[in-house]
Image: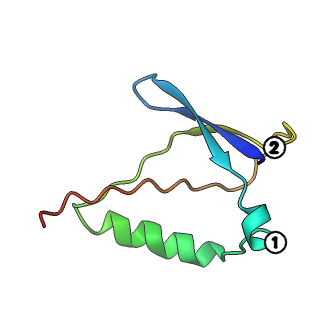
Amino acid sequence: MSLWKVLLKFSDGTEKELELSDAKTYFGGYLKIKRSFFNSLIKSLKMTKKYFTNKAIDKVLGPDETDWTLNPWMLLIIKDNEKK
């Protein structure tokens, strides 16, 4: 399976590397999502105090080590802390 590498650099200087599986093999291509979806999502997140956004993506490398950093990226990490 092909892996993408996402290098994160946080505001406190911490650096992390994530390896993400390439979804192309599952979907027969890449999903196409309009930028307006993400613009609306960011606007909604800024209106609530339950969630926050942060900039941390420093570099994105494709499975063939091609640098994809200049493309627009959004990494969503979601953790639900609501009591059940």
Residue found 34% across the figure and 64% down from its top: 46
Please tell me which residue is depicted at 48% across the width and 57% down the height of the picture: 76
Q: In the rendered view, how is the structure colored?
A: rainbow
Q: Is residue 57 visible?
A: yes
Q: Nearer the viewer, residue 17 or 2?
A: 2
Residue 20 % position (x, y): 64, 47
Quick check: 7 left or right of 60? left
Q: Is residue 11 above or below residue 26?
A: above
Q: Residue at x 46, y 22 (%)?
A: 13
Residue 2 image offset from top left, x and y in percent: 78, 47
Residue 28 bears which disc, if any?
A: 1
Q: Which residue is mark 2?
A: 63
Evaluate whether residue 69 shows in this view: no
Kindly give the residue lying farthest to the left in the view shown: 83
* In the image: residue 57, left or right of residue 72: left
Distance (Cα) linking label 1 and label 2: 16 Å
Q: Is residue 53 left or right of residue 23?
A: left
Amino acid type for the residue under numbered disc 2? Pro
Mark 2 crowd level (few <14, some 14–19, many ≥20, 10 Å Cα): some
* Type of amino acid at the residue the image marks with label 1: Gly
Q: Secondary structure at mark 1?
A: loop
